[in-house]
Image: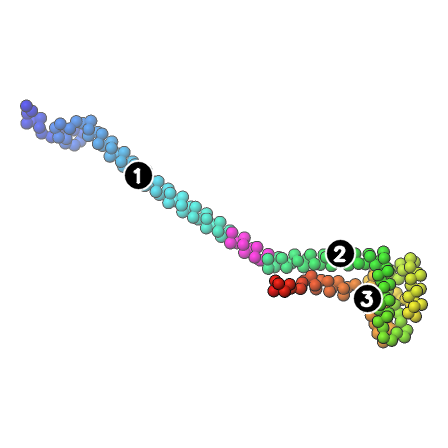
């Protein structure tokens, strides 16, 4: 039989505990509470950390999107402006190469020039006194290497050759009393450039 004193609450560890509840049980309950609070704090920290990470990744993703948009805009500008500039440079280079090849070819093989002169002379409605003008360099080279061909042209068309310093190598001009025919390379190159800049549109693509 327990005394009335034994049945009264006891004051232990700063709080009253009922008789029959050991101090060890009270300590375990306190440890559980502390563990619960620690777990709650860890969970709160985890949620806050995840929110911070997500916000950081969203910021990085937004920066990458902005960088991609800027790059796409630069590509569009290249398509509109840069492509035109590059295309014009390539056309100019092509024309320069074509001019060099044509002039060198006419110098090495003047038969094409003689043929063009024949056609130009034949196209004159009324020849009268006819002069075939060539660049000084071209005329000197032809007289030295193709004198017979020059003599044939002079005899066939009753024409004479003359040097013109304003003409470029490979160019020619046929002048009669009432008419003039230019055989310059520059207009031909200009037509080539115009065709390259404005290619014909395919009806299937139109």
**In the structure shown, which secondary structural element does the residue marked by tag 1 occupy?**
helix
Q: Can see residue 167?
A: no
Task: Tell me what residue is drawn at x 76 percent, y 58 percent.
Answer: 98
Q: Residues within 10 Å of mark 3 (few under 14, many from 20)?
A: some
- N-terminal label among 1 and 3: 1
Q: Give above or below for 60 relative to 82.
A: above
Highlighted magenta segment, given as a residue range: 68-78
**In the structure shown, which secondary structural element does the residue marked by tag 3 occupy?**
loop
Q: Residue furthest top?
A: 1
Residue ID for mark 3: 183
Q: Nearer the viewer, mark 1 or mark 3?
A: 3
Q: Residues within 10 Å of mark 1 (few under 14, many from 20)?
A: few
Task: Tell me what residue is drawn at x 79 percent, y 63 percent.
Answer: 185
Mark linked to residue 97: 2
Task: Tell me what residue is drawn at x 30 percent, y 36 percent.
Answer: 39
Residue ID for mark 1: 41
Q: Give above or below for 109 relative to 166.
A: above
Between residue 138 and residue 126, name the one nearer to us: 126
């Amino acid at each position: 039989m327990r005394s009335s004193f034994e049945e009264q609450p006891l004051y232990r560890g700063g709080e009253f505990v009922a008789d029959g509840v050991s101090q060890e049980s009270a300590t375990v309950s306190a440890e559980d509470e502390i563990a619960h609070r620690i777990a709650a704090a860890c969970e709160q920290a985890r949620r806050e950390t995840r929110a911070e990470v997500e916000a950081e990744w969203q910021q990085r993703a937004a920066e990458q999107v902005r960088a991609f948009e800027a790059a796409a805009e630069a590509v569009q500008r290249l398509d509109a402006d840069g492509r035109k500039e590059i295309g014009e440079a390539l056309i100019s280079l092509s024309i320069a190469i074509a001019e060099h090849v044509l002039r060198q070819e006419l110098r090495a093989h003047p038969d094409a020039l003689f043929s063009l002169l024949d056609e130009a002379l034949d196209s004159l409605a009324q020849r009268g006194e006819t002069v075939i003008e060539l660049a000084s360099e071209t005329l000197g080279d032809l007289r030295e290497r193709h004198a017979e061909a020059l003599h044939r042209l002079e005899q066939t068309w009753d024409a004479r050759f003359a040097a013109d310093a304003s003409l470029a190598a490979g160019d020619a001009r046929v002048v009669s009393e009432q008419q003039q025919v230019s055989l310059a390379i520059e207009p031909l190159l200009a037509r080539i450039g115009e065709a390259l800049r404005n290619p014909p549109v395919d009806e299937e693509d139109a």
